[in-house]
Image (cartoon, coloured by chain):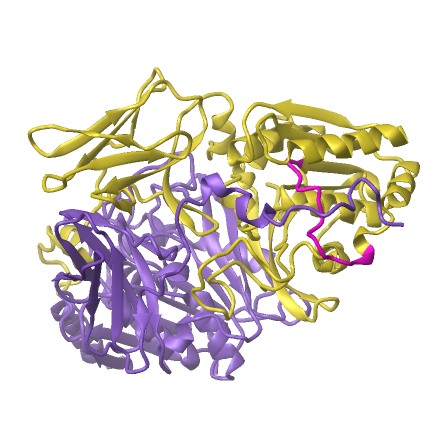
Chain colours: A yellow, B purple
Amino acid sequence: MRNRLLAGALVPVLALTMNAQQALQGGSKGSPAVHEDCTVTFSLKAPTAHEVQLQLDYGKAVTMQRDTAGVWTFTTDALVPDLYLYNYVVDGVKTLDPENVYIMRDVATVKNMFFVDGEQSRLYQAQDVPHGNVSAVWYDSPRVGTTRRMMVYTPAGYEQGKQRYPVFYLLHGSGGDETAWLHQGQAAQVLDNLIAAGRAVPMIVVMPNGNVDEQAAPGSDQRGLVTPTFNHKQWMEGSFESSFADIMDYIDKHYRTLKGKKNRAIAGLSMGGYHSLYISANQPRDFGYVGLFSAAIKPMRGVQSPIYDNLEQKLAAQFGQGVNLYWIAIGKDDFLYAFNKQYRQLLDQGGYPYTYVESSGGHEWRNWRSYLTQFVPLLFK
Amino acid sequence: MRNRLLAGALVPVLALTMNAQQALQGGSKGSPAVHEDCTVTFSLKAPTAHEVQLQLDYGKAVTMQRDTAGVWTFTTDALVPDLYLYNYVVDGVKTLDPENVYIMRDVATVKNMFFVDGEQSRLYQAQDVPHGNVSAVWYDSPRVGTTRRMMVYTPAGYEQGKQRYPVFYLLHGSGGDETAWLHQGQAAQVLDNLIAAGRAVPMIVVMPNGNVDEQAAPGSDQRGLVTPTFNHKQWMEGSFESSFADIMDYIDKHYRTLKGKKNRAIAGLSMGGYHSLYISANQPRDFGYVGLFSAAIKPMRGVQSPIYDNLEQKLAAQFGQGVNLYWIAIGKDDFLYAFNKQYRQLLDQGGYPYTYVESSGGHEWRNWRSYLTQFVPLLFK
């Protein structure tokens, strides 16, 4: 019997009116429209605006053209397949695209995102493959004296099996936090796709927060909705490196990890490359794989920490123990290029083997995502 | 010995230039400024704009006032302490606040957020208390034939101990997904704060995706960056309810759960309330605690599913088994008020005990967050 009270014809409008007061916009008008030739057309309806500009993350702002209906459009040249960010400027005010809910934060900047599809950028997008889990994990850090948050990727199948996995510690740059590699770096998608394609071995990826003066990303700890900043009191003065063992202890205790340096990698971008250099040099027995992505090689001026002392002796010990892979990548236009060159000369003087990749471009996520897709297939093999 | 190569004075500008090309905006100008009397002042610099409006999520758009420097401002009346959303409208174009990186998506709408602090809204904000972990978990759903994603909150201490915990299944509304309760509902903060205050028992909270035609929230599965929608092919036609056992099976297998109805709760808002009603009615032995928050009681027109048949008999079986708490809440102005009233009459006719909470307001997150803070303290006691 179907219930009498609830059986009447009803609610053709239910789906339309439900929450209607909270759905003030949305509904794609097809902008940005990515064409097969990799050009992209942007459209924004703004009949009463006097000037509308498009700001892509690569290149200068361009003025859009208004049609008689008040729709402003611009079509780009063909773009290299990648993840792109953009915003509009409407009568002088930076704005996000009201038609695009996909938004990415980089430090204190928010922009809309889209993909230009291609072999490389397909690695950055969720595909129909098995997915790993991603967890926001709070851990005690006795060496800091607080609880802190990190993100942990466990590969597809981790929950079902009893297998142990190697661990890749992946560090963000200055201004970033534990969420940076997942968002701008699309790390979970990259790992899912490389593992599914048989190009990388299943691994645990640990993404900690390298700013010791914050417990978690802005908005996720008791500081409230603070404005994210590049500058931290505790970031490149040794506190992250000297407390890193707390993270490793937690991971080895709570996850099914493989131990030993041949099962551990560490890499990071910019400040995270600097952290990776010194963590691996100060713990010469722990990391078989080290990646420096556009590394901010230099310690901050005025900093005194035993972490940064005696680097040559530490490198001698590190390479003396054997390093499976020491991988350095930087863009030709990176403002840190000269410092990286100096550092390679130091390695050369010691006769320490490393792999060097020089890309186009500068200090930017386009490079760091690419470096990740190049580095991960080299690990634990 | 300090390394010669790396010891020179350097980089006073490092922190300022690093990533500078990607940090085009940001830096709080103190807007919105929440004053002690709970009024809020908004400021937007837009010297060349002709009209700037402020749209708060409650109330009509208001026109802001321009000063001689081109800064547009508006100060609200005192606001009830809560989480608020807003956007600007600059010369007719809906925009987000370029000074505020905190953004919330609701279906296909994105807005900026801020808090007005008070006893109630403090529950929605991260405090200096122990934090539970939140995981994005992919699980096999044999009854659907795909893998799907859910969010799982485990309370502080879960990772360290061996204790088993009761489980609360918390369901989103139409247009929502597995992330809705965490974002708009601030569920992790609510649970952290209620547990830390001793007002709720530690529990696992499981937030699945109630739209069976998507594997995960928009952007997180292979559909790509689709525009989120209210309308799904599989959402209120029985497929979620009939596959719900896959979720429970996974949770009971992979987490340290307490079993039995006295250790299981299910609640949801709107469509999720409808799902909670029918899942608990179809599984009369499984849930001791049921919460219907502004429940969309009515099945969709034209839907035929055994899930929705014979409700009176199912309720007789459910209440015959004993229900610890059957909790119904709705706002006086909710467009689903009459249907909820009908449903309460049905329960009254059967002599089935329930708790009824009638609030002010309508079909809105302000109510759903409040209902969550009222419901959770009643569970598993």
State whether residue A186 is above or below residue A149: above
Give residue A48's quadrant in the image.
Answer: top left
Q: Is residue A133 above or below residue B255?
A: above
In reply to whether residue A303 is colored magenta, the answer given is: yes
Residue B298 visible here? no
- Extreme residue toward the top, this view: A37
The magenta stretch is: A293-306
Secondary structure, magenta segment, majority class: loop
x and y percent of residue A330 in the render? 64, 30
Identified at 11% across, 28% down, the residue is: A67
Q: Is residue B46 magenta?
A: no
Q: Is residue B365 left or right of residue B245?
A: left
Q: Is residue B364 left or right of residue A34?
A: left
Q: Is residue A279 above or below residue A221?
A: above
Residue sitting nearer the eye, B170 or A284: A284
Q: Quadrant of residue B219?
A: top left
Q: Residue at x 36, y 52 (%)?
A: B177
| Residue shown at 83% from the left, 57% from the top | A306
Pick out the residue farthest to the left. A68
The spot of residue A290 in percent (x, y) is: 75, 38
Q: How many discs appear?
A: 0
Residue A134 placement (x, y as % from top left): 55, 49
Which of A6/B115 is in front?
A: B115
The residue under the point 58% across, 73% down is B130
On the question of residue A143 being in view, the answer is yes
Whether B101 is drawn above or below A331: the answer is below
Q: Name the foreground residue: A316 vs B162.
A: A316
Question: In x, y percent, where is residue A344?
Answer: 77, 30
